[in-house]
Amino acid sequence: MKKEINTDLKNKLGDRWEIFKKLHKLILSLNKDVDFHVFPIYIRYSLGEKNIVLIYFRGKFVADGGFNIGLNLDKHSKIKRFVKAKYMKYPGITYSVKIKKLGDITPDVVKAIKSII
């Protein structure tokens, strides 16, 4: 049985909730064994011991609002918005993209997220 996102996180995200909900469902749909853990400033998604996605929702990586999504990609995405995620200093997370509105979750971003598994 999958864990549920608590109402405290929903309240923290406020008007960003719809964006997060779409990302969360997308990531969980990648594999039935994807698990997540909520931390004070980010959510980590993993598949076994492999970190596959980080969603920063607070802190210096999202000072301008929205989310900073770190992905475990084997090679650089062709999407220009993706940058190296070395600054995140998180094992396995190699590239990141900023998401500020629902429209930023383009088919190319969805394709990149789906390519993780």
Image (cartoon, rainbow, N blue to C red):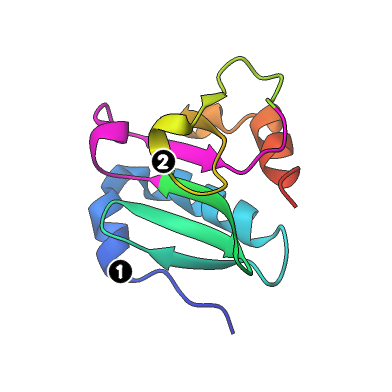
Residue indicated by mark 2: 89
The structure residue drawn at horizontal position 68% and vertical position 72%, both measured from the top left corner, is: 33
Q: Residue at x 25, y 66 (%)?
A: 8
Count the numbered circles shown: 2
Which residue ends up furthest to the top in the rendered image? 80
Instruction: Give percent across and percent down for residue 58.
Output: 26, 44
Left or right, 86 with reference to 26? left
What range of the chain is rendered magenta? 56-75
The type of residue carrying mark 2 is Lys
Q: Secondary structure at mark 2?
A: loop
Instruction: Choose mark 1 or mark 2, whichever is in front.
Output: 2
- Residue marked by disc 1: 7
Name which residue lies at 62% across and 44% down.
72
Residue 20 sits above or below residue 46 on the image: above
Q: Residues within 10 Å of mark 1 (few under 14, many from 20)?
A: few
Q: Amino acid at mark 1?
A: Thr
Q: Which mark is residue 59?
A: none
Is residue 4 visible in the rendered image? The answer is yes
